[in-house]
Amino acid sequence: MDNFSLISHQDSVELVYNENNHITGVTYIPLDKGESIAKPHLSHHFVVFVLKGRVDISCKDYTEKTVREGHMTFLSKGGFLEVMAHEVNSSLLFFGFDEVTIRTDKSLQDFFTSHANKDMFTHNTLPLKADMKHIVDGIVTQVRKGKIKNGAICQAWHTELFITFVTYYTKTQVTEFFRPIISTDINFRDFVENNYMEVECNALKLIHLSGMPKHIFNKKFKEEYGTTPKVWMEERFKRDLQYYASQPNMTTKYLAGKFQMTVIKLCKLTSRLYGLKPGELIARCKQS
């Protein structure tokens, strides 16, 4: 571990954990105005937190994008890296990892692959919400003190960071942020059926989530289903809705829970599709 470095820099302070060739680590780097970092090849993925100042970052996925204090961006492995600081006393925290290893209610990898692919990736930053900032500040304090001798703490930080991502950021934010490492191998039918409720039966939202051009998505959808996304989603949702609404002891709140949406959203959909409130639809389905 002593001979291993994530991001080499003369003033950097880092902690790295290597177990069975699985690398997780953190590197704190102070930068002055006009100072830069250049790496020809990144061997790991990185979440980069801008702690102070403002920097421009270029990598294989985007070039010269400005990231400001209190925000983070993502770098995927296999490409180059260039960072240039615009302000004095700037500082960064690089969190490096080979793969997402934690599991929540669903594995993060399943979460990624069922919500998007990496086509048409654009640069994304996220603000450090209070819960994320608390973790990052703790990491920086401990790493800069240099008192941690056990690199395995990096794996604990790995878990804490990614649980925070899926807990305090929306699905759209997470999938767009990590889009470069999202698999492109997902089956098109699986993508549609995993996500048609996620977008509340809105065809344009589903197309945007897929990352595909509209004409390509519609052509692929027509080949797969023989109809348009709008018609298919409405028919599929109505079929599912009527099935659950007819179940014994069904309530509006429970019905909304079946589709993982709020009661307000359910009301909007049943009103649009049936001209009825959810309770009225449940009563009708039970009668029939």
Image (tube, rainbow, N blue to C red):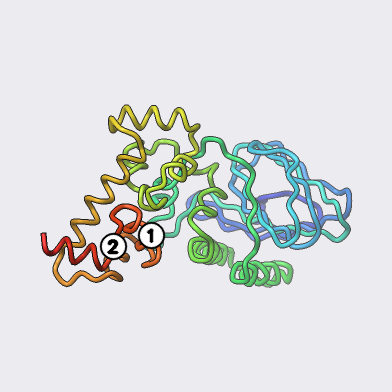
Precedes in sequence: disc 2 or disc 1: 2
Side (left or right) of 133 relative to 262 = right
Q: Which residue occupies 39% across, 52% down?
A: 200
Q: Circles 2 and 1: CB distance less than 8 Å?
A: no
Across and down, in percent, residue 222 comes to 33, 29
Q: Is residue 241 depicted above or below 132 in this figure?
A: above
Residue wearing tag 1: 268
Q: How would you rate the neighbour count of disc 1 (Cα within 10 Å): few for under 14, some for 14-19, many for 20 or more? A: some
Q: Quadrant of the N terminus?
A: bottom right
Circle 2 — which element? helix
Q: Amino acid at mark 1?
A: Lys
Q: Is residue 254 depicted above or below 285 in this figure?
A: below
Side (left or right) of 178 relative to 14 = left
Across and down, in percent, residue 242 comes to 20, 56
Circle 1 — which element? helix
Q: Spatial distance from mark 2 to mark 1, Cα to Cα?
A: 16 Å
Q: Amino acid at mark 2?
A: Lys
Residue lying furthest front in this view?
275
Across and down, in percent, residue 36 comes to 82, 46
In the picture, the disc for residue 258 is: 2
Front tag of 2 and 1: 1
Regarding residue 152, the answer to whether it shows in the image is: no
